[in-house]
Each structure stands twice: as structure tokens, then as C-alpha cells.
Amino acid sequence: MKRKVGDYSNYVQHPRYGRGPRFTDVCPKGVLPGYRLSTYQSDTTIGGTAVEADLERQSFSPVPVLYYFDLKRECVDCGRPFIFFAEEQKYWYETLGFALDSKCVRCIDCRNRQHGLERQRRRYEELYHCKDRTIDEDIEMAECAVSLVEHGIFHTRQTEHIRMLLNRIAGDNSVGRRYNHIRNRVLRIEGANDGGQTDERQPE
Ligand SMILES: [Zn+2]
């Protein structure tokens, strides 16, 4: 069977599973009534990546899932594309006991980062004192800052400084996606302040 490999060069690298799809020789058979073929039936499913589920171990669900497939996702924090790997799903739903409908919305980097706010604060300080920051370091600094504001560690007036960083970065195509994503997060924070609304992040 011919497989479309596609371009995954801009996908987030997972330290364990890699960057691109992991093709398997598993050929899903027909679906019995009362079962689902896969967790998500959408165009983000990558064909040819099926991993068979162990129904004995799978977290309880009214409708068990027979196979896991690699899925294309977009990270809610950094906006970069990543793959939620079939093997990762198996691990989530069979080893960690996560509910079958719990979705992976963050790339591995951001999941790690989510639990590393203290590290981000230190990294921010470090970059702050760095005189000749590269574009990548500027954007990293802006990402640290916006995340620290979102988590209430930095005051919301820090968004002025983030905007300054964004102005330095603006126009550099290599960081377009990350740039836009930071900009949207800044706008959301500022919007929440102006409108006097609570700064509630929309879960996806
Ligand atoms: Zn991310």
C-alpha cells in the first residue's frame, strides 16, 4: 500500500516518538456494533498508523475504541503542529488510565513547560540580562513572559514589554506562527483587562 508521507519538518519533535507519523503494518478489520474504530474520526487522523487497543486495559467508556491512530494536532499554547501518537494514546488510555475523551491539546514541549513555570521565570531573567539576543531568544523570552502573565506570576502590565519584544521580532518569517500566537495571547490578556472580564482561557 502506498502511503503519503507528507511534510512534517515543522512538527514538534517528541523525545520518544519523533516528529513524523509512525507507520505500522496493522490493518484494521471491520468494526463490530458497540465499538468505535478510533478515538477521533476526523481528517486529522493519519492513515496507516493503527495500533491495536487492549480492551482489557482501556479506560472505561460506553463505546470502546478498537484502534489508535496518529493524529495531527495544533498546540493551544505555541500554535505549532504536532502529532498525538497512537502509542502515546495507548499509554494515556491504557497505562495512565486517562478517560478516552481526554484530548491532547498541547505539544510535548508545552506540556513540559506547563509544569515548569519556575524554570520559565529563571529563563526569562537569564534572557533579560542577555545583551545580544537572537530572534529565537527574543521569541522565547516573549513566550516565557506571556505564559508567566497568564499564570498570574507576572503583572498584566508586562504585556507592554512583550509588545516591545514582538516589535523587534515582527517581520521575521521564521517565527511567524509563534509570533502570531503570542500576539493573540497578549490581545486576549489586554482585552480581559479592558473589559473588566475574568481572564478565562478557553479550553479546547
Ligand atoms: Zn506547544
Image (cartoon, grey):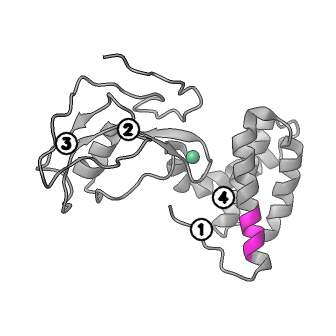
Q: Is residue 155 visible?
A: no
Q: Which residues are magenta?
A: 187-192
Extreme residue toward the top, this view: 2
Whichever of labels 3 and 1 marks the residue nearer the N terminus, that label is: 3
Is the shortest distance between ligand 1 and the CB of mark 3 under 8 Å? no
State how far apart marks 1 and 4 are (Cα). Answer: 12 Å
Whichever of labels 2 and 1 marks the residue nearer the N terminus, that label is: 2
Crowd tier of the residue under label 2, counting other residues whose Cα lies within 10 Å: few below 14, some 14–19, many 20 or above: many
Whichever of labels 4 and 3 marks the residue nearer the N terminus, that label is: 3
**Residue 188 lies in magenta, yes or no?**
yes
Classified by dominant secondary structure, the portion drawn in magenta counts as: helix
Task: From the viewer's perspective, tell me whether residue 82 is left or right of residue 159.
Answer: left
State how far apart marks 4 and 3 are (Cα). Answer: 36 Å
Q: Nearer the viewer, mark 4 or mark 2?
A: 2
Identify the residue position indicated by label 3 in the image.
53
Label 4 near label 1: C-beta < 8 Å? no
Q: Position of residue 186 (x, y in %)?
A: 75, 61
Identify the residue position indicated by label 2 in the image.
85
The residue at the point 81 percent across, 64 percent down is 158
- Amino acid type at mark 4: Ser
Decide: is 165 above or below 8. Answer: below
State how far apart marks 3 and 1 are (Cα). Answer: 33 Å
Identify the residue position indicated by label 1 in the image.
201
State how far apart marks 2 and 1 are (Cα). Answer: 25 Å
Is the shortest distance between ligand 1 and the CB of mark 2 under 8 Å? no
